[in-house]
Amino acid sequence: MRVKLHEILDFENVNHLLEGFYKTTGFLTSILDLEGNILSQSGWRHICTDFHRVNPETAKKCLISDTELANRMTNGEKFHCYQCLNGMVDVAVPIVIKGEHIANLFTGQFLFDKPDESFFEKQAEIYAFDKEAYLKALREVPIVSKEKVQVAMDFLLDVTKLISETTFQKQEQIELNIALKESEERYKALHNASFGGIVIHDKGRILECNQGLSEITGYTYDELIGMDGLLLIATETRNLVLNNILSGYEKPYEALGIRKNGEIFPLRLEARTVPYKGKDVRTVEFRDITEMKKADAALRKSEAIKNKMVSNIGDVIEIIDRNAINLYQSPNIESLFGWKPEELVGKNTWDIIHPDDVAWGQQFLDNLAKVDGTTGTTELRYKRKDGEYVWIEVTVVNLLSDKDIHGFLSNYHEITWRKKAEQELIAAKEKAEESDRLKSSFLANVSHEIRTPMNSIMGFASLLPDEEDKESISDYANIIVRNSEQLVHIIDDIVLYSRLQTHLLRNIPVGFSVCDLINDIKQSFNLPEYYNRGVLLKTENNVGGKCYVHTDYDKLRQILTNLVSNAFKYTTAGSITIGFSTYHGELCFFVKDTGIGIPSDELEKVFERFYRGSNVVKSAIGGTGLGLSIVKEMVELLGGKIWVESEEGVGSTFYFTIPGGLTTSREGV
């Protein structure tokens, strides 16, 4: 706020000082505020008062001169000399209080040199002044040197400095008084507006109190002053309060108060020892905490109800902040996931999310954070306290702007069982789709396999009636026989597989020589279509001597025949070995080849129905895709197990066990 100089400065003393300066030096002075109001003056020159400031035109020139000098002062100059438009020389000195330019001290109406009277005569003519009187007034204007002006200005600078300091001190005193008054009023207002009672006592005797104490206790102010303050404390806690007074205890504590009407109420007390009127006394705050106690009890009840409700719902309730730090975990997390809430609160939630799911979870949360109130649901792998990761489904709502939550509110529950069911369903679907594809492939393949021999049979049969050459007739007949056998074999496979699927086959165990069976199977492949391939069929006995077994002869022969036939399909060079040994006390047969082998990732699939290897040129190698599936079904029908070992490009070995009381004599079976 701009300083009002006339409200602060004692101008009677200032006028006296400036008047003395005028009488001593002949320099006229005046003090004007920035609005042009004259605050003090010590005379004016007649040429100014009787002529220049009387005539409206020359008065304008005076105003221009004053304005020019005032403007110069705003530039920070110590003082400035200026020859006004009416011919007089004026000097101005700024008066600055606390850095604020508030007024100017003027001196002047003198000349530096002898005046040019012709200028002033012309002035008299222009403005109709009485020339003689005007020139006489001009001659009264003193002519002073610039050196004398400098000396005078040094004095006037000291005067303005004195004015500034005096004004500053006076202003500070005024401001201090105002602040003190405001402080007293504010203290009084706060004292009486306190939410509790304020007491100053000396050894229990009340010296001063506020209106709040009257409102709490029911006593009037006059009744309280001089009263023993311990009478405001219920007898149950009076000794506690007295001991705290005597010990100078200064921390908050609770006691029981008693009102004028005898009502007892909970009270919070906090005291300090303070100086008061030359001695140490106690100032105490009395606060009625009845409502707070009720609110605490209600809150505890509400919390208990909430915890019971949350503990009995199926989801964990969670609150995390923007940085994923846990702020709250509902109590039921312990029964559902093993964690106690306090073990997670304050920690980063990503620490218990599977590392492979963290990036996705963070992206999910970042997307929710973009819009207030957005809700989203996702699935993550969550670490239980025992270290096991389980799948959870979590629903999150963005409540970052909510003044109570200020975070993400989530509820989540375990869905491992659902994920497992989904995966099983997907696997079953894929298996069904694969089975359907294989069925389609099987039907197309069977159609092709049947049509090929049928075409040969029908084609050569149609040639027989017209053929006269006996040798050609014999060749045609042989072709028809071979294709008929192939067709019968295909049909047998289909019928056999169908009977296996419908559980129509039964075991008929008999005793027989294993060596005889192996030799019989080898002899059955002693046909041109096999030995002309250049693949050697060998046998191998790893048991030693003859041995006998008690099992279904026909089924065992079918199993070995199918395996050898399958080996011939995929072996173009090298050998095929059919043999037997013992394995964990049981008879173990094997068929080993040096064929194309089976890819390692397909070893579990080779026994599936309709399956044919990915490295097989199916157009070049015939078959229905049922051979190995029939073998597996028949091995299991005999109570055995079958498996395969193979290396792609090297060959394969099929093993199977047959329980049946292996002995070295026919009598044993």
Image (spheres, rainbow, N blue to C red):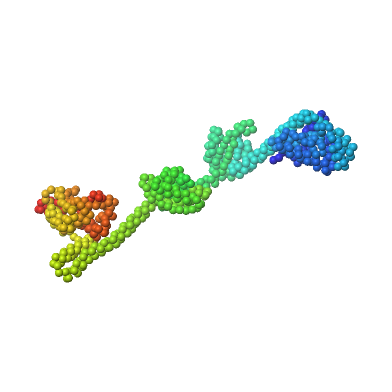
Where the C terminus falls, by quadrant?
Answer: bottom left
Residue 417 placement (x, y as % from top left): 36, 53
- Residue 111 can be seen, yes or no: yes
Residue 71, quarter of the rendered image? top right
667 and 287: which is toward the camera: 667
The residue that appears at 14% across and 65% down in the rendered structure is 471
Where the N terminus falls, by quadrant?
Answer: top right
Question: Relative to 258, is 615 on the left or the right?
Answer: left
Question: Relative to 580, is 357 on the left or the right?
Answer: right
Residue 389 placement (x, y as % from top left): 37, 47
656 and 417: which is toward the camera: 656
Disc count in the image? 0
Furthest toward the front, the residue is 469
Q: Is residue 349 above or below residue 446?
A: above
Furthest toward the bottom, the residue is 465
Residue 105 placement (x, y as % from top left): 76, 35
Residue 616 placement (x, y as % from top left): 26, 55
Residue 218, quarter of the rendered image? top right
- Residue 638 can be seen, yes or no: no
Q: Is residue 255 above or below residue 404?
A: above
Question: Relative to 140, is 441 on the left or the right?
Answer: left
